[in-house]
Amino acid sequence: MDHNTAYAICALNDIPSQRAIGFHLMIVGDDGAPRPWPIVIVRWGKQVFGYLNRCPHGGVNLDWERNQFLDGNGTRLLCGKHGATFELGTGHCVDGPCKGESLTPIALAVLDGDICVTGVRLVEEDDEAAREEA
Ligand code: FES
């Protein structure tokens, strides 16, 4: 399986600096079956950080209001359910019920001004269309 492909998710400039946006993607699992892959991408200047949109404590998505990922100061990711906070650059939980645990990091690269995910196989729209026709 080719895990070296980089999939463009959005342009770097689609995410304002110091903001986070969620994406509902689908990946091809090891068994070949598609499965949902919700992620959150944080931009800080020219840097981007990606994590699975899943709180390590409750296993739920972080943004209880869609795309509200950051705490009041805008300097940490926040789980909207019980208020765990996570460092933007490491995903490390610094406060809340999962203190000491971490968000699952996602490998990202910025290529030609696009934020790309690497290391996974995404279900692309064409695959989906092909399956629907089959
Ligand atoms: S589910 Fe995330 S802090 Fe409880």
Image (spheres, rainbow, N blue to C red):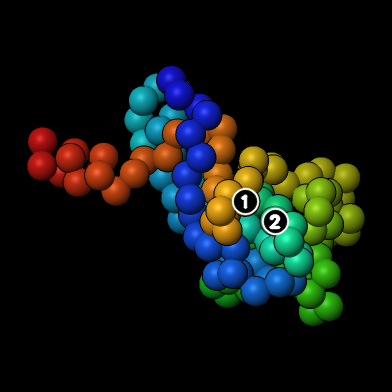
Q: Work out whether residue 112 or residue 2 is closer to the camera in this orientation and state it.
A: 112
x and y percent of residue 34 in the render?
Answer: 36, 36
Q: Residue at x 50, y 60 (%)?
A: 10
Q: Mark 1: which amino acid?
A: Val
Q: Which residue is mark 2?
A: 48
Nearest the viewer among 97 and 68 is 68
Q: Residue furthest front?
A: 112
Q: Is residue 133 visible?
A: yes
Give residue 79's quadrant in the image: bottom right
Q: Which picture quadrant has residue 78?
A: bottom right
Question: Helix, strand, or loop for circle 2?
Answer: strand
Q: Amino acid at mark 2?
A: Val
**What residue sits 65% from the left and 74% below the top?**
16
Number of numbered discs: 2
What is the distance, in whole Å, between disc 2 and disc 1 at their CAs?
8 Å
**Residue underneath mark 1:** 110
Q: Earlier in the sequence, mark 2 or mark 1?
A: 2
Mark 1 lies on a secondary structure that is strand
Q: Is the residue marked by circle 2 packed among few (<14), some (14-19), or many (20+) residues within 10 Å? A: many
Residue drawn at (57%, 58%) of the image: 113
Q: Residue 14: where, in percent of width, then height? A: 55, 70
Q: Where does the C terminus fall, quadrant-wise? A: top left
